[in-house]
Amino acid sequence: YVASHRSSWNFVPLPLDELTLGDHLAASGVRAALVGKTHFVPDAKAIAMRGIGVDSDSGRRLLEGGFDPYDRSDGVFAGPVSREFLETPYARYLAHHGFGGGNAWHDWVNSAMSPDGQILSGWDMRYAHLPARIPERHSETAYSTDRAIEYIRSQGDEPWCLHLSYIKPHWPYVAPAPDH
């Protein structure tokens, strides 16, 4: 609960002393992986103050809320994007499949198209009834599902847990046809 873990809003760092499901599973020898969205952010100042190396097993778990980020995709806002965004697996997937532009996630996945060819941002609710420009097979949902299936198939007989967190339905409220 928020009252106990003290992370009261998206992007509020989780205190280092708060154990997550991933931490408990790892202690039991279960690999806990993440595919999709999470707004978890680490308490980077506390990690640095304690001298925990971010390349160590414990440091990596602290950076990812106790999970192994098999394919983390937190979404993106409209406008210019950071280099960090351009290097995400989903952004590379979009580029590989020909969805170009300075911010393909916004321009294709989270936007619609006007009759005169203008990009209509899904962040503007008045366009929520229109289909996203991305075909459904390349949407965040289809991509995350494919990555989750890939993860599950790769696990063999070792114990595992997968946190699959879809971005949609979530702001911006645009979806590809026929689900729009």
Image (cartoon, rainbow, N blue to C red):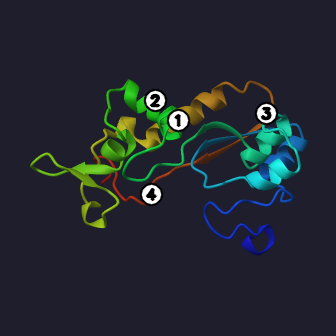
Q: Name the residue that disc number 2 marks.
A: 92
Q: Any mark on residue 88, and which?
A: 1
> Alpha-carbon distance for marks 3 and 4?
34 Å
Q: Name the residue that disc number 4 marks.
A: 169
Q: Nearer the viewer, residue 174 or 102?
A: 102
Task: Answer whether labels 2 and 3 touch (C-beta < 8 Å).
Answer: no
Q: What residue appears at the point 39 percent right and 58 percent down from the top-left corner?
A: 172
Please, what secondary structure does the residue beneath circle 3 have?
Answer: loop
> Alpha-carbon distance for marks 1 and 2?
6 Å
The tag earlier along the polypeptide, 1 or 4, is 1
The tag earlier along the polypeptide, 2 or 3, is 3
Task: Answer whether labels 1 and 2 touch (C-beta < 8 Å).
Answer: yes
Q: Amino acid at mark 4?
A: Pro
The tag earlier along the polypeptide, 4 or 2, is 2
Residue 139, x across and y down, in percent: 40, 41
Q: Any mark on residue 55, and which?
A: 3
Instruction: Tell me the quarter of the image containing the N terminus.
Output: bottom right
Crowdedness near tag 4: few (<14), some (14–19) or many (≥20) residues, C-alpha within 10 Å: few
> Alpha-carbon distance for marks 1 and 4?
21 Å
